DNA sequence: ACAAAAGTGTTATCCATACACCCATGT
DNA sequence: ACATGGGTGTATGGATAACACTTTTGT
């Protein structure tokens, strides 16, 4: 987990763990996949970067905890959230036994003004292949999130959560290319996406480019299984 | 989680959760996919069935907790274990806030003598489509496990963990058919499996059947990504 | 001899891939 | 007029899917 709050010392005598959530937050910025990180200002990990996270409250579900911490630390409203993996190695947090349920979060809210929580030095987007030194086991957590995202791009309509409500097909393609780190053939990509019947044309076009692109939207916001790759 | 132990009452005042593990244990018995369940003898869920599980110790990782509880409750040695999903809804356990990290467990150890722990009334294998009334959210947990198993059959060599070290190709096919609940074409299945180069012939044959089947083994015990279906 | 499960090939269809040029607009 | 990204079709090869009979053993 990623808070710098001290754990209540008396808790360690009970043979139970503290439960936290962590979030791997991805967004596309200028056609590139980025992760959101916070700079730690205190204690052993001072100067390193961490993914957003924090403890769960007794009366809140995991997803509610994710929403709460994201809203507080970053100001994001309702992004896509899916549980990723639970990290629980005994010594993953030097302050005590912390079991953290990591979540994958996708947002298209890219130019949202980021809010730095008071206990962090900074908050920033980083390219996934140019990560700064990370605290805890957060490198593992981010890589697990990236693998999940890669896998799910191939068989679901999850890509929509990295895009605004309407988008050009070339934007969608650049989501795929950026996440998978490889180029795709434009004609084959468009043929495949259109044949899957998961997007539909709007009557709008992009303004202020060269030749204006047709704007599309996803037909269903619901998660759907489709063979894309 | 699945124990009937009372939670220490004083813990509930601290705003933290108890962490448990649960296990969805699958095995093939007489060509059919079965789940292992324990009968609860006390408290609100008396008479219902539960999957094996229990609390984690402060100095043990999740997988160690899984091995410990399985060994104690069932006598299984070293099965295949993979983390599945974390169930943490506020009211999933009437005794308090219990966050349970569910695991998928596969074993070929089918005629192992099952040991009933003292606090359980019975321990038994059930067909996955003939489940008895279940305690907690264990129906959800089992279904999550089944979905994971189905998905992974399609793109990994995970099926080996449901089979003994050597097996006939028809045994392997019946794993697929039973887990996926559909028939597969024998010739196409064998052609596909052999072309993937994940199994190799041994020089043994099945004894005491009609025409003896050639026995195969998996080449690699390591998890491998292969397009099977 | 017969019952039971093991083993074996070919064909047709579908899908994935590779590939190059014209179009609409802004400057 | 030119620079920029948008948009379009076809041909080939490989994978998948459908399909039925012979073989080996035990009884």
Image: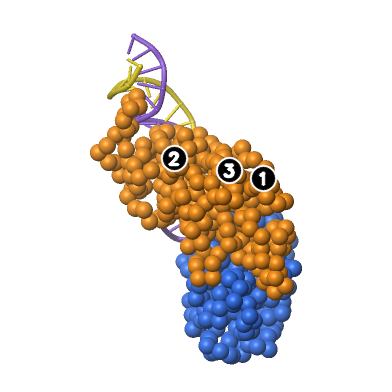
Chain colours: A blue, B orange, C purple, D yellow
- Within 10 Å of the Cα at label 3, are there few (<14), some (14-19), or many (20+) other Cα atoms? some
**Which residue is the site of mark 2?**
B111
Q: In the image, residue A115 lies at what x, y percent?
A: 69, 84
Left or right side of A100 for A140 = left
- Residue for point 71% across, 63% down: B96
The relative height of residue C22 versus residue B194 in the rendered view (above or below) is below
- Within 10 Å of the Cα at label 2, are there few (<14), some (14-19), or many (20+) other Cα atoms? few
Question: Mark 1 against mark 3, which lies toward the viewer?
Answer: 3
- Residue for point 58% across, 87% down: A40
Chain for mark 2?
B
Q: Quadrant of residue A170?
A: bottom right
> Which one is nearer the viewer's eye here, C3 or B224?
C3
Secondary structure under tag 3 reads strand
Left or right side of D26 for A115 = right
Secondary structure under tag 1 reads loop
N-terminal label among 1 and 3: 1
Chain for mark 3?
B
Chain for mark 1?
B
**Which residue is the site of mark 3?**
B122
Q: Considering the image in quadrants, where does the N terminus of chain B appear? A: bottom right
- Residue for point 68% across, 89% down: A118
- Residue for point 33% across, 44% down: B217
Query: Are the residues under marks 1 and 2 on the same chain?
Result: yes
Q: Quadrant of residue B122?
A: top right
The relative height of residue A43 versus residue B181 in the rendered view (above or below) is below
Please report contact status of discs 3 and 2: CB closer than 8 Å, yes or no. Answer: no
Q: In the image, residue B132 lies at what x, y percent?
A: 64, 40
**Which residue is the site of mark 1?**
B48
């Amino acid at each position: 987990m990623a808070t710098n709050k001290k754990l209540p010392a008396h808790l360690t005598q009970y043979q139970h763990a503290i439960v936290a959530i962590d979030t791997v937050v991805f967004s596309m910025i200028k056609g590139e996949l980025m992760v959101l990180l916070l700079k730690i200002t205190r204690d052993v990990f001072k100067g390193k970067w961490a993914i957003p996270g924090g403890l769960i409250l007794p009366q809140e579900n995991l997803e509610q905890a994710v929403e709460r911490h994201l809203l507080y630390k970053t100001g994001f409203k309702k992004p896509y959230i899916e549980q990723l993996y639970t990290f629980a190695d005994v010594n993953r947090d030097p302050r005590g036994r912390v079991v953290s349920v990591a979540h994958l979060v996708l947002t298209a809210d890219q130019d949202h003004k980021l809010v730095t929580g008071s206990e962090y030095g900074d908050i920033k987007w980083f390219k996934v292949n140019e990560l700064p030194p990370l605290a805890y086991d957060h490198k593992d957590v981010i890589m697990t999130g990236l693998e999940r995202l890669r896998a799910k791009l191939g068989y679901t309509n999850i890509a929509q959560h990295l895009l605004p409500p309407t988008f050009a097909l070339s934007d969608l393609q650049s989501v795929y290319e950026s996440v998978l780190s490889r180029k795709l053939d434009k004609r084959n990509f468009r043929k495949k996406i259109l044949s899957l019947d998961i997007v539909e044309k709007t009557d709008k076009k992009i303004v202020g480019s060269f030749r204006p692109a047709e704007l599309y939207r996803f037909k269903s916001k619901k998660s759907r299984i489709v063979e894309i790759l």
